[in-house]
Image (tube, rainbow, N blue to C red):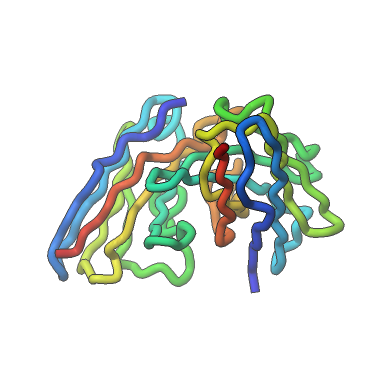
Amino acid sequence: EVRLVESGGGLVQPGGSLRLSCTVSGFIFSDLYMDWVRQAPGKGLEWVGRTRNKANSYTTEYAASVKGRFSISRDDSKNSLYLQMNSLKTEDTAVYYCTRTGGVPGNWFDPWGQGTLVTVSS
Amino acid sequence: QSALTQPASVSGSPGQSITISCTGTSSDVGTYNLVSWYQQHPGKPPKLMIYEVIKRPSGVSNRFSGSKSGITASLTISGLQAEDEADYYCCSYAGRSTPVVFGGGTKLTVL
């Protein structure tokens, strides 16, 4: 069964840090591109960032809104993806989804995890 | 990179067909045949319905179809059913450094 499970969300103060994790099963994780997508309460989907696979040197890309504050990493030996979020702002409050990126050069998302809620508030 | 433009809402009666548009630019929808569509029910993660403009993943009903003309992509749902009531988002590839851009979402109401 293909499964993505996020964890690590919670309440954090503005300026704080949080690390999200996503554990993947049912795929050969090392072959995958993986993305993070977020959804603020009552709002639409916003792409956050991407990590490519080993064959593509694990290169990463980030949305302008998070560049320099967020960092994506992965541990292929643990089938795990991470999102390190620093200097958090209230506008980062959202449900964060990890998703397998499909197609060439990576243009669709399936499946998605169930999401983890990050609330940035004092 | 600006979001793709979708209508905020559409509605239709059971059995009817509806179409949701998704307008981008020459940098995304207009250049790449790499548009995908997602269905999201309240409290659930998005579900891939269409990818690469016209392709349907295994298990998705053939009542869902996609198309594209110029900078506008479209999702058509035929034979509307109550279970189709959901939010729908389009997404387009937009280049290596900002790989994807989403639409603002469309709320579909089945009357």
Which residue is painted at 43% across and 61% down in the image?
B43
Q: Is residue B54 above or below residue B57?
A: above
Quarter holding the N terminus of chain A is bottom right
Q: In this view, does B22 lie above or below A116?
A: above
Figure quadrant of residue A27: bottom right
Which residue is the extreme one toward the right? A77
Horizontal side of A116 relative to B102 (left or right) equals right
Residue B37 versus residue A104: which sits nearer the camera?
B37
Residue B17 versus residue B108: which sits nearer the camera?
B108
Which residue is painted at 46% across and 60% down in the image?
B47
Which residue is painted at 77% across and 39% down in the image?
A58
Q: Position of residue B42 (x, y in %)?
A: 38, 61
Figure quadrant of residue B12: bottom left
Which residue is painted at 64% across and 67% down in the image?
A3
Quarter holding the C terminus of chain A is top right
Q: Position of residue A83 (x, y in %)?
A: 70, 43
Q: Where is residue A44 in the image (x, y as percent from the top left)?
A: 40, 44
